[in-house]
Amino acid sequence: MISVRGLAHRYGAVEALRLPEWKVAQGERWLVLGRSGCGKSTLLHVLAGLVHPTEGEVEVSGENLGRLRGARLDRWRAASVGIVLQALHLVRHLSVRDNLRLAQYLGHVAQDDARIADTLAAVGVGDKASRRPPELSQGEQQRVAIARAVVNRPKLLLADEPTANLDDAAAAKVVDLLSEQAARYGATLVVATHDSRVKGKFRERLEL
Amino acid sequence: MNLASLSASYLRARPLNTALSLLLLSLGVATIVLLILVVSQIEERMQRDARGIDLVVGAKGSPMQLMLSGIYHLDAPTGNIPLASARALEKNRMIRKAIALGLGDSWKGYRIVGAPHSYVEHYGARVSGRLWEKPMEAVLGAEVAQRTGVGVGGKFTGAHGIGGEGDEHKEAPYTVVGVLAKSDSVLDRLVLTGIESVWQVHEQHQGPEDEADRKALEEAREVTVVLVQYASPLAAAMLPRQINAQSELQAASPAYETARLFRIVGVGVEALRAFAVVLIFAAALSVFIALYTALEERRYDLAVMRTLGASPRKLFGLLMTEGVVLSLVGAVVGLALGHVLAAVLGAWLEGQQQYRISGLEWRPEELWLALVALAVGIIAAFLPAWRAYRTEVSKVLAQG
């Protein structure tokens, strides 16, 4: 599913990431661990095709990301990757349903309200579809962000520090939910975190 | 969900900025539309009323006043000229058509004009009933009949002066024998009668006591203006000079005086037009500032859209669409507002018995105006859209 060889990325003179080799099979669940600034987010951005690494090769689902550019890369990302960001970044003035419709529109997926309802119900916010994000609790927003990431049924689900700022119970629930949703759609899950509370959740770990 | 609905949702999310941009743009467009409608309709109407009239001959005074009173019946006449002078003009070989008019009285604010039948024929107006044959028979213009509710067989008395506030000639009532069909000409707003009626009304005051008096009065008869059509181009060069050389007569060219009038009025029109252009420029600035400042608030949204699969081109399109939606709505509201203002102005002018302005007419220039408004939106949105296009997703997400 994921194959990384000789990966390095630098911002100017600063090396942000170095990963000689890493292989992930389809459907596996991985934790990427490390202190702040070790390159966890950069790795996720590379895997999502948001950043082209300065060195090395990355293949995701058989696509060599170094060879994808422009619109092809955008289309590939839309079809293959779902991302949950630390700060969630839901579009505040759109309803929960419209946030997911936006994901379908930008992902070139035909608008499917039944699928949106099903996805929201699966993450436990089926009754919040008409609310706007500021009207939801932090936990509910987190669930909506996960729903948005999986509504297009991606092959790869990435989560960047999804448990930051959450209490122990909420952090455990979020990781469980991510894991459950990845399993539901057969997606590979990669969670980048420095949160020691979730270390025991997955068997596969990558230390950066 | 599509680009237009997404853009509209962002515009709705900033109601104050959006309303301000729309207000400025629509006010600018409305002002220009109002000017286009008013100026073009007045120009057309004045050209129509002056069609086939090469010269207005009347008493010495302001040539523009002579033209305004003689052709358009919008001002007081400069005075009267002897009937003999008018008759002489009719016989002049350089003149194909001479229509002598006698002015002085009015009814409910509408001018009573003593005229020959050729005046009606000149504007090609059709009459229901018949034209006047005897003194004190009158024919009403379409607007006069409609507004007063008087038809064939009705009677009325004129009042001295043009405002309707003068003494009424109660001893000399007119009988309506015909009503003119609407001709979109000055006739619509006139009460027409034979020029003998005008003389009769005023001679009754002087009450001739014997035949010698009557003869003296007849010799002193006057007309107010003579509308002249040249027989040949040569007349244009010679006739005005010839007429102006006579001590009691003055000749005014409608073409020249109308152009002069529009030059004078044009200063005000140009000032208003410049003001409208400033409003449109301010609207462009407002759209630019609104979109540019909103970029800062929206940079995470834009970055997230990229993670969801949006291409840089789509983000560019999103911002451009916002500019286009704003300018299109502003243009449509401005066009509608301009027409409503023209209709309101038209209703007010109608109440003043002046030229009618219609809010329902559309001019080709309005399409150009809408395109200019659209271009304003596109230009104003370009830089913010370009910045959105250049969003560095990784950098933005790393900050948040």
Image (cartoon, coloured by chain):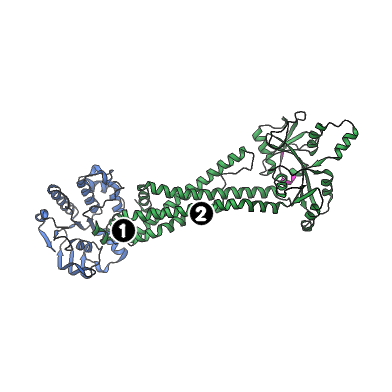
In the image, residue B126 lies in the stretch drawn in magenta: yes
Do circles 2 and 1 both sit on a common chain? yes
Provide residue B225's location: percent of width, then percent of height: 76, 45
The residue depicted at 27 percent of the width and 43 percent of the height is A131
Question: Which of the marked residues, 2 or 1, is nearer the chain's N terminus?
Answer: 2
Magenta region, residue range:
B121-127
Provide residue B143's location: percent of width, then percent of height: 66, 38
Q: What's the colour of chain B in the image?
A: green
Which residue is more in the foreground, B23 or B338? B23
Question: Helix, strand, or loop for circle 1?
Answer: loop
Q: What's the colour of chain A in the image?
A: blue
For residue B365, say whether it is visible: yes
Count of marks placed on residues: 2
For residue B362, say whether it is visible: no
Q: Chain of mark 1?
A: B
Label 2 sits on residue: B277
Q: Amino acid at mark 2?
A: Val
Q: Chain of mark 2?
A: B
Q: Amino acid at mark 1?
A: Ala
**Which mark is in front, 2 or 1?**
2
Question: Helix, strand, or loop for circle 2?
Answer: helix
Residue farthest right in this picture: B212
Label 1 sits on residue: B310
